[in-house]
Amino acid sequence: MATETLYIVATPIGNLNDITLRAIEVLKQVDVIAAEDTRHSKKLLDHYGVDTRLMSVHDHNEEAKIESIKGLLSDGQSVALISDAGTPLISDPGFRLVRQLRADGFQVVAIPGPCAAIAALSVAGLPTDRFLFEGFLPAKQQARRAQLELLANESATLVFYESPKRIEACLQDVVAVLGADRWVSVAKEIT
């Protein structure tokens, strides 16, 4: 295990068994795990017997935690960043942290694994030779439709994340803006 390293560790996107052996090994060996929601992550870590110290790093405190994590790395420790599900930084916190640590010369290592966008795309029956991942569309209808308008002429398969609470309204906007002749796949709890 390399010291002074931030590991970006992918976690399961539903089924707890969808984690790599390397991910479990890294989570057991690092000095600290920076988790999006420590309560949520504790279930996964307990399942695999990981008792590594946890700290919370989420959208609302990420900027403030950068110095703490830099301090840990400067002291020769290693840190793993995990999100609630899937690959960190993919519509999850961590971008500012990774950018700053790389700028400061620290090593950042990916521990690949599940990604909900790729898993859903692989079973959608839509073209996968070209796709555009847009993450979450805006929650408000006017802003969401404006974003969809920008994508109206895109020929690649479009991939979005959406809240179950807003999926119906989002699909209505997709039809209104992109047309009813588009193929759509909706995936949830795919593992």
Image (tube, helix red, strand yellow):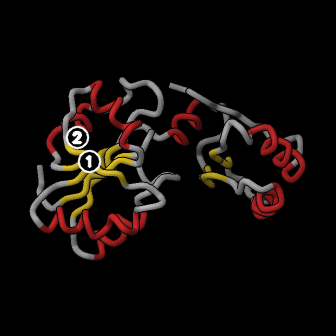
At 59% across and 37% down in the image, what residue appears? 121
Residue 82, x across and y down, in percent: 35, 46
Q: Do the residues labelled 2 and 1 touch (CB within 8 Å)?
A: yes
Regarding residue 101, the answer to whether it shows in the image is yes
Residue 122 horizontal side relative to residue 44, left or right: right
Residue drawn at x 23%, y 37% as measured from the top left: 22
**Residue in front for this viewpoint, 74 or 175:** 74
- Above or below for 177 versus 20: below
- Residue at 14 percent across and 42 percent down: it is 29
Residue labelled with disc 1: 33
Instruction: Name the kind of residue labelled 1 in the image.
Output: Ile
What element does badge 2 sit on? helix
How many neighbours does mark 1 have within 10 angstroms: few (below 14), some (14-19), or many (20 or more)? Answer: many
Task: Give x and y (percent) for residue 154.
Answer: 74, 57
Image quadrant assignment for residue 71: bottom left
**Which residue is at the front of the view, 143 or 115?**
143
The disc at residue 27 is: 2
Specify the amino acid type for callout 2.
Answer: Leu
